[in-house]
Image: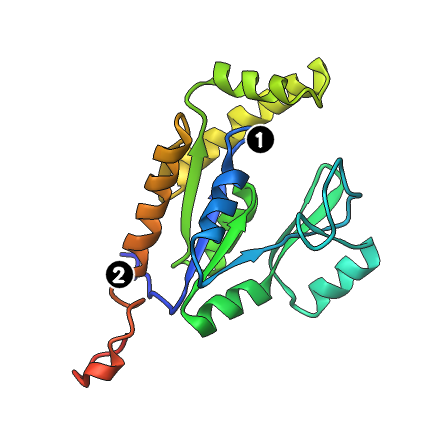
Amino acid sequence: MNAPTVLQPGLLLVLSAPSGAGKTTLAHRLLKETPDAVFSISVTTRRPRGKEREGVDYRFVDVATFQQKIERGEFVEWAEVHGHFYGSPQSAVDEARARRGSAIFDIDVQGGQAIKRKHPDAVTIFVLPPSMEELERRLRDRQTDSDETIRRRMLAARSEMERGIASYDYIVVNDDFERAYSELRAVVVAEHCRRGRVDVSKLGLGVGG
């Protein structure tokens, strides 16, 4: 039998979704309305795209710097995706643990599963579009990708959704943003109330928390 997961102080919240499902918008709304939350800004070796800003969307570094960060143990997870490297900073985990707050990770399933292996008490939430047709419509409405790119994104989305549905703790369908956000918020509130995450030390009951 597997040993029960030991809950640590602080909530590590992993959000994943196919491109176009609305995950990043949900993550930023949650960050705005959760005072104790820190957003994990991923480090990447790829160049900025569109309106992406350094220190806001990503931290952009060269390959040598990324390698140094690996060697110094600065990533809770890292991976190579389409020829570029991406990593989530360990500092976000440390800060959430120290403050009994939340760390929000906006990453793909591969990264989410890596964090879950390292921190089994991490909470994983997969955001789904209401349908494949709606997902394609959202991608086309952006007017930033060619037909070929959209076809590739749709194939990648199918694979990502199958992996997310099979392995993640919670599923949120983003057919209506406000409803999806309320479901996401409900998960966060409930997880913060779980035994092990609530500090009961001041009660003097002889139990940890």
Which of 10 and 30 lies nearest the eye of the viewer? 30
Q: Does residue 108 show up?
A: yes
Q: Can you identify the residue that label 1 sits on?
A: 19
Q: Position of residue 105 (x, y in %)?
A: 52, 51
- The kind of residue on which mark 2 rests is Arg
Relative to 37, is 183 on the left or the right?
A: left
Badge 2, how many Cα within 10 Å: few under 14, some, many 20+?
A: few
Q: Secondary structure at mark 1?
A: loop
Relative to 139, is 3 on the left or the right?
A: left
Q: Position of residue 92 (x, y in %)?
A: 55, 63
Residue in the picture at 32% in, 61% down: 5
Residue in the picture at 53% in, 28% down: 159
- The kind of residue on which mark 1 rests is Ser
Image quarter in which the N terminus is found: bottom left
Q: Position of residue 82 (x, y in %)?
A: 72, 36
Q: Is residue 61 above or below residue 128?
A: below
Residue in the picture at 44% in, 72% down: 99
The image's mark for residue 194 is 2
Report how many numbered discs are placed on residues in the image: 2
Image quarter in which the C terminus is found: bottom left
Q: Does residue 172 show up?
A: no
Say how the picture is coloured. rainbow
Which of 157 and 117 lies nearest the eye of the viewer? 157
Q: Position of residue 196 (x, y in %)?
A: 29, 68
Residue in the picture at 16% in, 83% down: 205
Query: As drawn, which residue projects farthest toward the left?
Result: 205
Dot 1 or dot 2: first in sequence order is 1
User: How many angstroms separate mark 1 from mark 2 (CA)?
Assistant: 31 Å
Q: Is residue 80 above or below residue 208?
A: above
Q: Is residue 35 above or below residue 94?
A: above
